[in-house]
Image (tube, coloured by chain):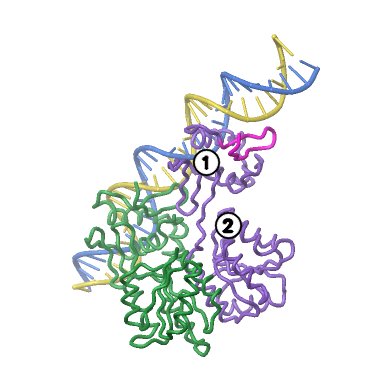
Chain colours: A purple, B green, C blue, D yellow
Amino acid sequence: MFHVLLIEDDLDLAETVIDYLSLENIECDHASNGVMGLQLSQENEYDVLLLDLNLPRMDGLTVCEKLRKQGYDIPILMLTARDQISDKITGFNTGTDDYLVKPFDLDELVVRIRALARRRSGQVQRLQCDDLIMDLQTKTVSRQGQLLKLSPTSWQLLEVLMRAYPEVVTKQKLETAIWGDMPPDSDSLKVHMFHLRKAVDAPFDKSLIHTIPSHGFALRNET
Amino acid sequence: MFHVLLIEDDLDLAETVIDYLSLENIECDHASNGVMGLQLSQENEYDVLLLDLNLPRMDGLTVCEKLRKQGYDIPILMLTARDQISDKITGFNTGTDDYLVKPFDLDELVVRIRALARRRSGQVQRLQCDDLIMDLQTKTVSRQGQLLKLSPTSWQLLEVLMRAYPEVVTKQKLETAIWGDMPPDSDSLKVHMFHLRKAVDAPFDKSLIHTIPSHGFALRNET
DNA sequence: GTAATTTTTAACCCCGTGTTAACTGTCAGC
DNA sequence: GCTGACAGTTAACACGGGGTTAAAAATTAC
């Protein structure tokens, strides 16, 4: 019924949790480090994220922060050790929705998962770059408060660009983002970029979409 | 900044909480019994309700239940004594959103209040979008006070849309909501959407149901 | 069992969108 | 200045998603 992701490096604990949750009819994927966890949570649609604080390769708070910055609003349940109470507060500011102190009661875990799964995270799912705002929940894009009309592909392109902001996105990445592993014969990407620019940049003074020759494209607010 | 209501008969505890919350810039009204608490919470717009379980005149669970039945979806934080763990589960089923075991840490209380205030409760009995109102108790939908006649499937569709409001719902989600994992051969979803529109939008000036191309459908009151 | 309602299927149309390809412009290097 | 690579621009066309309609099938009500 529910589908959650547990990011936890203590394998014993992880197995216990997974077994118990399966009894409660909750499917539970597992990642044992922060980087893997981040990747999995981006690729799949989970109802809730169970996130350990101390993790190899990338700690829990960073995972949380990255996800929020990229516009994901999965409810996140933090698992903290008892001596990290001060971290709790930080967690809530970073975008965590709830927490449990280890060692926790498994029944309690289930109750909290159910409660979180019922509602969206309180974190607004919005990507922003200067005066350009993309609301992923209502699927609306606006610049200077004014709604923009985007075709589906233009939307996809912009979403990738905004998630990556302020980094450069290669043309390859954009192509695979739209067409997967079957890109069209001719490079229609540039046509789409043109349409996107006409919608996003043309009506305004400043251009946000910049081409980085022989690398790709990037959103920038300066220059 | 925040405005909460504490319903608690232990006056010492109440005062401690109120004082502490004021330091955290949280305004806290107080009622010392269930009946008063219910009345206050109906009259004012609180961000969160802090609700003791054992109360004179009307116990906490009943207060919670009554509120939900009347369509109030204030987030409710239950305060339970340690020996009432079993009540926790009941609480979540009755419409509670979170709980704390007495004696609780005041910092923890603040954190949870902030977390709850960010989101609506998942327990609404009445869904509303502009002048469109769905009463889950009496199973009736009305717009501009006038009853609408919906077929079972149309009802299901509308319910999903209203629960998600103002977010976009993908066609996939709508399909699984109706047919589970066995969607019909042809896409009869659009026919149902057509019927739903005829019932909900056609008789009125403004359209509430909008299609977001290649994403899905959404309820909107603007434009 | 029949009538009424609801759901499914199928066929149709239309407009928005994506694709393609040809053209223009710009810059680098010879 | 010529040429070739690359990015931007434009228009023609085909496709398909979504809206609409009607009729068959299934379900429910009487």
Locate the N terminus of chain B by quadrant. bottom left
Q: Name the residue under label 2.
A: A68
When asked about the image quadrant of residue C23, the answer is top right
Closer-to-camera residue (B1/B173): B1
Residue A211 among magenta residues:
yes
Amino acid type assigned to the residue bearing label 1 in the image = Ser
| Disc 2 residue crowd, few under 14, some 14–19, many 20+, Cα 10 Å | many
| Disc 1 residue crowd, few under 14, some 14–19, many 20+, Cα 10 Å | many
Mark 1 residue element: helix
Amino acid type assigned to the residue bearing label 2 in the image = Arg
Q: Mark 1 points at which residue?
A: A154
Mark toward the start of the polypeptide (2 vs 1): 2
Mark 2 residue element: helix
When asked about the image quadrant of residue B167, the answer is bottom left
- Point out which mark residue B59 bears: none
When asked about the image quadrant of residue B10, the answer is bottom left
Closer-to-camera residue (B75/B26): B26
Q: What stretch is highlighted in magenta?
A: A208-223
Who's the residue at 39% across and 77% down the image? Answer: B30
Measured as percent of width and height from the top left, residue A122 is found at: 50, 62
Q: Chain under label 1?
A: A
